[in-house]
Amino acid sequence: MFKPFDLSGKTALVTGGNGGIGLGMAHGLAAAGADLVIWGTNAEKNARATAELAAHGTRITARVVDVANEDDVVAAMAGAIAHTGRLDACFANAGVSNRWGSFLDMGGADYRRLMAINLDGQVWTMREACRHMKVRAEAGDRGGAIVCVASMAALFGAARNEDYSATKAAVISVIKGIAVEFARYGVRANAILPGWVATGMTQAAQANDQFTDRVIGRVPMRRWGKPDEFAGIAVYLASDASTFHSGDAILIDGGYAAF
């Protein structure tokens, strides 16, 4: 029987999988039967996420990894594959944001750190996953899913947030390149573009009544998105249901961009 959304026997990596959208996706993947590797920089959050995800009954491994450090990513990916034996789906999700008063204030260490995590970190993570999938394909085991979490901000004028939106636009371009280069190995690559989602990253905005009125008020669904609403798209992209879906930027925003 064809079960396109059954992830039994597959292993997925989720960076930043210990909270927010990453944890929401991880729950969906584990519930569908996938074994998981979680990367995060906070050991306590990793442990809590592991305990939550273990309830699904699949194998869960967590590791402290700073995706901004290229050597750390290379070593962590090699370690993950050695431990699990394979990687079928890679979700490059880890990201941060800055709170600038103006574009004129932008720069310095905070700017560099954001670029290193949101752009470099996703590139290193996806590159190493592609390296494994290429080797696996050349040995006769084709296929794999590369997914990056970008943002709706890549499509709009994000005032005081130009650095964040620049990284999100950039990774969409990287995804399209991967989709073209690695299709010959059965690998597909897609980006997820979340809209306004209630996570730790958006706590300040959630507490701002004016923001809620002016911004969330024009979301057609009239509410914030929830991390667990990204579970389904994660399962779809990791599954055999999406084997001809590649090079896409999938907007999940409650209809915000359409209004």
Image (cartoon, grey):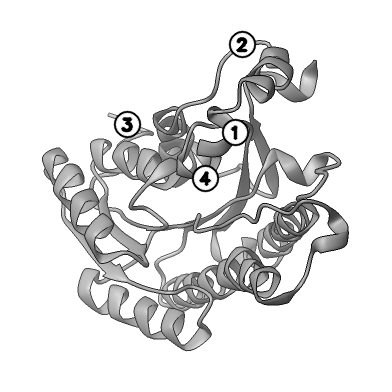
Determine whether the residue tagged by mark 2 lies in a helix, strand or loop.
Answer: loop
Which residue is labeled 2 in the image? 222
Which residue is labeled 3 in the image? 3
Instruction: Work out whether mark 2 precedes mark 1 in sequence or the reverse, and give the earlier one.
Output: 1
Instruction: Work out whether mark 4 precedes mark 2 in sequence or the reverse, and give the earlier one.
Output: 4
Determine whether the residue tagged by mark 1 lies in a helix, strand or loop.
Answer: helix
Label 2 or label 1, whichever lies nearer to me, is: 1
Instruction: Work out whether mark 3 precedes mark 1 in sequence or the reverse, and give the earlier one.
Output: 3
135 left or right of 107 in image: left
Type of residue at label 3? Lys
Which residue is labeled 4 in the image? 201
Could you classify mark 4 by the number of other residues whose Cα lies within 10 Å: few (under 14), some (14-19), or many (20 or more)?
Answer: some
Instruction: Work out whether mark 3 precedes mark 2 in sequence or the reverse, and give the earlier one.
Output: 3
Type of residue at label 1? Ala
Q: CA distance from mark 2 to mark 1?
A: 15 Å
Instruction: Work out whether mark 4 precedes mark 3 in sequence or the reverse, and give the earlier one.
Output: 3
Which residue is labeled 1 in the image? 205
Q: Quadrant of the N terminus?
A: top left
Counting from the top left corner in percent of width and height, residue 68 is at 53, 76
Residue 124 falls in image quadrant? bottom right
Q: CA distance from mark 4 to mark 3?
A: 35 Å
Mark 4 touching mark 1, by CB under 8 A?
no
Residue 199 visible in image: yes
Determine whether the residue tagged by mark 3 lies in a helix, strand or loop.
Answer: loop
Label 3 or label 1, whichever lies nearer to me, is: 1
Residue 239 visible in image: no
Type of residue at label 4? Met
